[in-house]
Image (tube, helix red, strand yellow):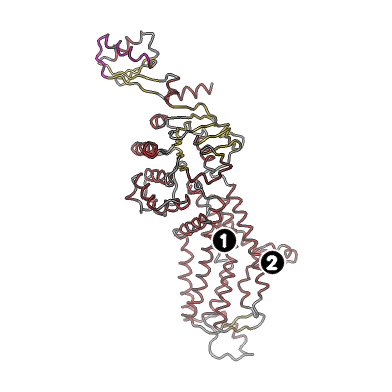
Amino acid sequence: MTLLLKATWYEIIKIASKWRTYIGFITIAILIPVIMFLVRKYGFGVQDNALNSMKGSFVFVGSLVNGLIVSYFLMNVLWVHFPFFIVLVAGDVVSSEGAAGTFRIWLTRPISRFQVITAKFIATFVYTAAIVLFLGLLSVGLGMLIVGGGDLFVFDKGILILSQGEALYRFLIAYLLAVCVQMTVASLCFLFSSLTSNSVGPIIGTYATLVVMFILSMLKIDALKVIHPYLFTSYFDVFFAPFSDPIPWQEIAGDVGKLGIFILVFYLASAISFIRKEITT
Amino acid sequence: MILRTKNLSKRFGNRWAVDGLNLEVEKGQIFGFLGPNGAGKSTTIRILLSLIKPTTGEFSFFGKDFRKTGRNVYAKIGALVEKPDFYQFLTARRNLQMLAGLSGGVPDKRIDEVLEIVKLADRADDRVKSYSHGMKQRLGIAQSILNHPEIIILDEPTNGLDPEGIKEIRKLILRLAGDFGITVFLSSHLLHEIEQTCSHVAIIDNGKLVVQGEVHDLLRKNDFYITEVLVDDPQRAMSLLEKEIWIQKITSGDGVLKIKIPAESRPRLTQFLVENGFAVSSVIPRTSLEDYYLTLLNRDMK
C-alpha cells in the first residue's frame, strides 16, 4: 500500500512536470476571462433570443443574463472539445514511458506492475478531476465576478429558475458528474496508451472512438437504439441532469454506475495488457 | 549461489533468442556475460529482471526460486539494462528519489552517497536532459546501487561511451566489487572489457552457453597465453626463435615479439635469448581472451 501511494505521488509529479499538462489549464485560464469580458461588453445572444421569444407571455424585470447562465452554456464544451485536454495527458501516461525506455529502470524495482499501472491510473484521475474542476471553478467564479451573479434561468421541460445558492450547489454536482464523464474518456485513452509506445495513437484512437460513438448516439434510427446502452457517450449528458427539478438522483446514479462500469473495464483491460507487456524497448 | 538459471529459454516467433541457458554466479564474483551482438545477452538479462517472461526454464536469486520470492527479491538487486533512460524533465536527484522510494527503505542521505560515488554530486540538481551520455551512464549505475544491492546486473554499461568514459565505468565497477563487496553480473560484447574487469565469464552464442568458468582457468586450460618480448634486435631474435620446435607461434609488430608458448616454457625463452646475446628489456605474459573466444565460437560454428 505504501509503495502504491508513493508510486501515485511520483506519477503525479511526472504529470505535473510536463509542459503538455498545462496546455489545458492555460487555455481555460485565457479563454474563460475573455468570454466573460466579451459577454459583459456585448451581451449574450443565445439567451437573449430565447428570452425575447417569451417576452409575450412573461414580464422580465432587469436582465436575466448573468455569469451563471454563461457558465451553464459553457458546460457544452465538455462534450467534444474538452476531452482534447484529457487525452493529451492520458494518452501519454503509459505510452511515453515505453517509448522513452524508462520502464527498464522503473520496472526493475520491487513494486509490482499492477501497482505501477494503478498508480498511473489514479494520477490520470487526479489530473482529470483537477482540470474539470478548474474549468468549473473558473467559469462559475469568473462568471459571477465579471458578468455578475443572480438567479440561474434554465430551460428544462419548461422554465426553471434557481436561486444563486441553489444554482451553485447544482454546478458543484454537475462538475463532479463531469469528472466522471471525462474520466471515462481518460480511461479509454489510458487503455490505448497501455497498448502502444507512442502518445499520438491513443489520442487519435480515443477521439475517433468518441466521434463514432457520438454519431451512433445522435442518429435517430430505431435499429441503432439497440446499441445505445453500450455506448458510453449515451450517458455523457448526465452532467446536465442536476439542472432539472427535482434533481433526478436515481437517473444520475444509474448513469454514473454505467460510466463506472466502463471506467472499470477500461482500467482492468489496461492492467491486464500492462502486466503481460514484454518490455523490449 | 547468488544467481542460477536452469534451462532458461526464450522464443520470439520461430527463433530461440535464449536456448536452455544454465548459469551459475557465486557471491563476490565479477561475472562477465560475453557474446556477440544478438547472442541473447540482453534477452537473458530482461528475463532475470522480469521485463520479459521466459518461454521455459527457471531462475533463482540467493538460492530461492524466483517464482516463490517474486519481485520482493529485487530489493536486493540493482540493475542497468542497456542505456539508462531517466525522466529527462526531472533532476537527477528527483529521479533517484523516486527510484529510492520504490526500492523501499532507502534514506535520503543514500542518494547523496551514490551521487558522490559516481561523481555526480555537483550536478545532482540539474535536469537529466542536460547530461552527457557518460553522465547518464554513471547516473544509471548510481540508481543500481541505491538500495545497497548484493548483486548488480549491468547490461553493456560502456556502450556508446568514449575511451575515457569506458575507463571511468570500468574503474567504478571494480570499485563497487572491491570496496563494497557487490557481486557484479556484467554483460558485454567487448572482449577486452570482460578480460580487464571480470573474474569469471560465461560465453554465449546463438542463445546457447558455450562455456563458463574462471577467466584465468579457462585461459590457462586452453593455453591462450601470449608472451610479449622486447629485445634489442627483434628481427634476428625472430629468425632464431622460429627454428626452435618448442615455440608454438611467433609474430612481431611495433618491435615487440609475440610468442605463443606454454607458461612453463617462459624461463627457457628468457634463458635462450640471453644466451644468444640479446639485451632483453621485458618479458610480459599476456592472456588473450579474444583468441580463446574466437576459437570457441569458430569451433562451435564448425
Snapshot quadrant of residue A262: bottom right
Snapshot quadrant of residue B271: top left
Write down the chain letter for disc 1: A
Q: Position of residue B74 (x, y in %)?
A: 50, 44
Q: Nearer the viewer, residue A259 or B106?
A: B106
Per the rendered image, the range of residues in magenta is: B264-281
Q: Are marks 1 and 2 in contact (CB under 8 Å)?
A: no
Q: Nearer the viewer, residue A3 or A209?
A: A3
Per the image, label 1 sits on a secondary structure element best described as helix
Is residue B272 highlighted in magenta? yes
Q: Quadrant of the C terminus of chain B?
A: top right
Q: Position of residue B295 (x, y in %)?
A: 47, 22
Q: Position of residue A220 (x, y in %)?
A: 71, 68
The residue beneath circle 1 is: A186
Q: Is residue A135 above or below residue B80?
A: below
Q: Nearer the viewer, residue A98 or B224?
A: B224
Q: Nearer the viewer, residue B7 or A187?
A: B7
Is residue A75 highlighted in magenta? no
Amino acid tagged 1: Ala
Alpha-carbon distance for marks 1 and 2? 25 Å
Please tell me which residue is depicted at 57% across the width and 61% down the height of the picture. A186
